[in-house]
Amino acid sequence: MKTAFVTGATAGIGKATVEALVEAGWRCVATGRRQERLDTLVEQLGSDKVHPCVFDVRDEAAMDAAIAALPDDFAGIDLLVNNAGLAQGLAPAQEADLDDWQTMIDTNVSAMVRLTRKLLPGLVEHKGAIVTIGSVAGSYVYPGGNVYAGSKAFANHFTLALRADLHGTGVRVTSIEPGMVETEFTTVRTGSKQKSDEFYAGTNPMTGEDIAATIRWIAELPPHLNINRLEIMPVTQDFAGFRVARDEG
């Protein structure tokens, strides 16, 4: 039985990924900050299939302790799903909160890099796989995206660079770059469930389950196949729309 390490597993894409992989016969190390939600996953799927690790990915000491304490059945990682991430604020750069910027860098960049490096030796030994959840924001910027878009551009390209460095090891590496997915993401970003509901209203967005099914598909491909990067959007969203500021004088 193979084992996956899934970050940000308390909601959205991460939670759905754990559910999808367990259904497919995997064991999962599920990480997140909310103990009660991880406990619910264990109750739902079984302690023999899900091992909860409660820590904030920005806390390197807690991350190290959690990895060191993995039970034998969960210690050999075959798949790393770098899912944990967030966006804070929608203000233009000149008005943005520097603390919001730092939080996004610490979570979306620094924590992801540290965890990946810590698990890489085992992934090479197992000829495993890495799937990183980037974003279309890393390719198509938008007003107010500033550091979030920059952090996801980093995630997208760091993942492709891993693919180059891991050449010849048998490790498969994929950057999944989703567009609009309705999860708790926008509620966290805006601090308002109402604003989130308004943002997604009438859009028929993707769901966490949609992305989880894609991760499962990638994880179960034959070992000689690699999906380098996958950009995925709902049909109702596209990438067109360059803006022009016109002089009214």
Image (cartoon, rainbow, N blue to C red):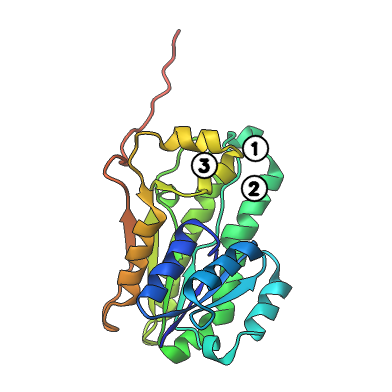
Report crowding for label 3: few under 14, some 14 to 19, many 20 or more residues within 10 A (C-alpha): many
Which is nearer the eye, 131 or 240? 131
Q: Looking at the picture, does residue 104 appear above or below residue 123? A: above
Q: CA distance from mark 2 to mark 3?
A: 11 Å
Q: Amino acid at mark 2?
A: Trp
Label of residue 101 in the image: 2
Report crowding for label 1: few under 14, some 14 to 19, many 20 or more residues within 10 A (C-alpha): some
Q: Looking at the picture, does residue 127 appear above or below residue 36? A: below
Q: Earlier in the sequence, mark 1 or mark 3?
A: 1
Q: Residue furthest right?
A: 61
**Residue tagged by mark 1?**
96
Which is nearer the eye, 208 or 90? 208
Which is nearer the eye, 32 or 120? 32
The N terminus lies in which quarter of the figure? bottom left
Q: Amino acid at mark 1?
A: Ala
Q: Position of residue 43 (x, y in %)?
A: 54, 71
What residue do we see at 63% from left, 63% from top? 36
Q: Is residue 241 left or right of residue 184?
A: left
Q: CA distance from mark 1 to mark 3?
A: 10 Å
Q: CA distance from mark 1 to mark 2?
A: 8 Å
Q: Earlier in the sequence, mark 2 or mark 3?
A: 2
